[in-house]
Image: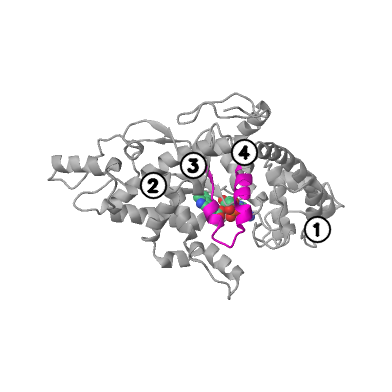
């Protein structure tokens, strides 16, 4: 692949990565290195108890291509992704099938999908170390989602607060489509297909992750552990949500106009959020107009002052996560200007924080061929893993598979059934497959 001019050429080819993938400039690379905190989280390596080998743990996440990405998406999710990418086996998708669960404009979907992928790259996601792909280009997502729909009780979905909020926002008279209701099942399929262990998301997704775990457990129990006459190895892993711990960043960025509701793409007012592509004047204007309170002193973590708390946390997150006391001291020195001085400082910090991201975004977006190639590689890699898991899930559910797909359980199990007809436990299939290699977590 020919690399665009803004690319360096220090590709670090990892297992399963195409050697020719692009990589980044030295300056950017060193900025990324400083973000590498995954070792501190003790999540890097997983001991495969069966083989004694260490392998990288798998991370998967995604963002919907609806409208523009905002600071909440970046600080709550994408910034974390960039931190994990060198030490984990990372898969990042643009979840365009989730974007159609609310009314959408078909004229913009493709463009927004590509823009979101370009934004991943601009935010520091390095395609020579991760797979970046578009959900709708991997058919296994929709197929597995249907299978999981058939084993997910409606009562579980009725409890989802995001569904209840969205439904309420649509209004009493608006039709609620089945896709919106089943949205978390599609999300579970996204994660389970890759047998991902870690899912970096913002706080608002915690409940969806719990649901994905419940679905995985229920499937494994029903179709693998309880299976008669022989058990099967579990098809799915139970994923863990990776949500920034207090102190390490912001897991929930709040609206600029109401410190009690989260910053969101779907909020009617654009002044409630900082979009990653807002220009400097827009940012200054939004911060000038954002909601504050009557108190002068600027202090973290006062529950009675949600706006103050939110703005301070944003400032801290974009200026290197310094200790809160340092920031409070810095801002106390701004007095008597108080809020006005802080707002100015915050606006300038946001402008300089976002400007390199915006510059890279425009570079990537102008190179359509480059982006297409990254996504084609991502699609190919994703298809290979997802179709393997899907086949195992279909086999566990008892579908008749085309003869060339009887690899994971079918043939292996038949052979073992004949050899071990008096035992109820199934040894690992002798046929080499992703399932066998990865030692399903029971
Ligand atoms: P969405 O915009 O709903 O597709 O969300 C994409 C990712 O951004 C998810 O991991 C969310 O948890 C995260 N996210 C969205 N809004 C916020 C927010 N206001 N604060 C923190 N994380 C957020
Ligand atoms: N539901 C997530 C959100 O709104 C987006 C999403 C879809 C996702 N599939 C996913 C996130 C899989 C993580 C993993 O933010």
Q: Residue at x 34, y 46 (%)?
A: 391
Between marks 1 and 4 in the image, the one whose residue lies nearer the viewer: 4
Location of mark 1 (residue): 289
Packing grade of label 3 (10 A; few <14, some 14-19, many >=20) is: many
Horizontally, is 74 left or right of 136 in the view? right
The spot of residue 292 in percent (x, y) is 77, 60
Q: Residue at x 59, y 29 (%)?
A: 22
The mark that comes first in sequence, 1 or 2, is: 2
The spot of residue 68 in percent (x, y) is 66, 51
Most extreme residue toward the left is 422
Q: Quadrant of residue 428?
A: top left
Label for residue 237? 2
Please indicate, yes or no, whether residue 314 appears anywhere in the rendered image. yes
Whether the residue under disc 4 has CB within 8 Å of ligand 1: no
Residue 310 higher or lower than 371, as above or below: below
Q: Which secondary structure lies at badge 1?
A: helix
110 is within the stretch colored magenta: yes
Q: Quadrant of residue 384?
A: top left
Q: Residue at x 64, y 43 (%)?
A: 119
Location of mark 4 (residue): 121
Q: Locate the N terminus and report the quarter of the image it occupies.
A: top right
Between marks 4 and 3 in the image, the one whose residue lies nearer the viewer: 4
The mark that comes first in sequence, 3 or 2, is: 3
Most extreme residue toward the front is 107
Q: Which secondary structure lies at badge 2?
A: loop
The mark that comes first in sequence, 4 or 2, is: 4
Residue 280 higher or lower than 262, as above or below: above
Q: Quadrant of residue 20?
A: top right
């Amino acid at each position: 692949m020919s690399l665009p001019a803004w690319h360096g050429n220090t590709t670090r080819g990892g297992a399963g990565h195409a050697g020719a993938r692009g990589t980044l400039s030295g300056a950017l690379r060193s900025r990324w290195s400083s973000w590498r905190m995954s070792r501190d989280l003790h999540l890097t390596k997983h001991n495969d108890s069966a083989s004694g080998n260490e392998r990288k743990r798998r991370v998967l996440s995604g963002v919907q291509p609806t409208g523009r990405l905002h600071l909440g998406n970046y600080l709550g999710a994408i910034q974390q992704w960039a931190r994990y990418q060198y030490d984990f086996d990372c898969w990042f998708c643009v979840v365009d099938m989730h974007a159609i669960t609310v009314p959408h404009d078909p004229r913009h979907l493709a463009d927004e999908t590509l823009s979101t992928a370009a934004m991943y790259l601009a935010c520091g996601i390095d395609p020579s170390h991760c797979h970046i792909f578009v959900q709708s280009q991997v058919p296994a997502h929709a197929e597995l989602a249907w299978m999981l729909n058939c084993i997910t009780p409606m009562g579980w979905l009725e409890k989802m607060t995001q569904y209840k909020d969205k439904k309420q926002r649509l209004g009493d008279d608006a039709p609620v489509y089945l896709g919106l209701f089943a949205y978390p099942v599609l999300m579970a399929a996204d994660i389970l297909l890759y047998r991902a262990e870690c899912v970096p998301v913002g706080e608002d997704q915690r409940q969806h992750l719990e649901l994905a775990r419940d679905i995985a457990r229920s499937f494994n129990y029903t179709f693998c552990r309880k299976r008669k006459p022989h058990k099967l190895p579990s098809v799915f892993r139970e994923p863990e949500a990776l949500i920034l711990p207090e102190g390490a960043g912001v897991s929930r960025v709040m609206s600029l106009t109401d410190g009690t509701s989260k910053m969101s793409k779907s909020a009617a007012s654009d002044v409630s959020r900082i979009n990653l592509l807002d220009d400097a004047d827009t940012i200054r204007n939004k911060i000038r107009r954002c909601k504050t309170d009557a108190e002068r002193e600027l202090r973290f973590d006062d529950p009675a002052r949600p706006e103050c708390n939110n703005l301070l946390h944003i400032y801290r997150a974009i200026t290197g996560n310094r200790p809160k006391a340092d920031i409070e001291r810095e801002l106390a020195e701004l007095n008597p200007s108080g809020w006005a001085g802080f707002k100015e400082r915050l606006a300038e910090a946001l402008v300089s924080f976002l400007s390199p991201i915006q510059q890279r975004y425009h570079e990537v977006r102008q190179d359509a061929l480059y982006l297409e190639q990254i996504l084609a590689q991502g699609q190919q890699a994703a298809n290979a893993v997802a179709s393997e898991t899907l086949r195992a899930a279909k086999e566990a559910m008892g579908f008749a598979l085309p003869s060339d797909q009887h690899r994971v359980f079918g043939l292996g199990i038949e052979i073992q059934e004949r050899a071990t007809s008096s035992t109820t436990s199934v040894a690992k299939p002798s046929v080499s497959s992703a399932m066998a290699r990865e030692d399903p977590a029971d």
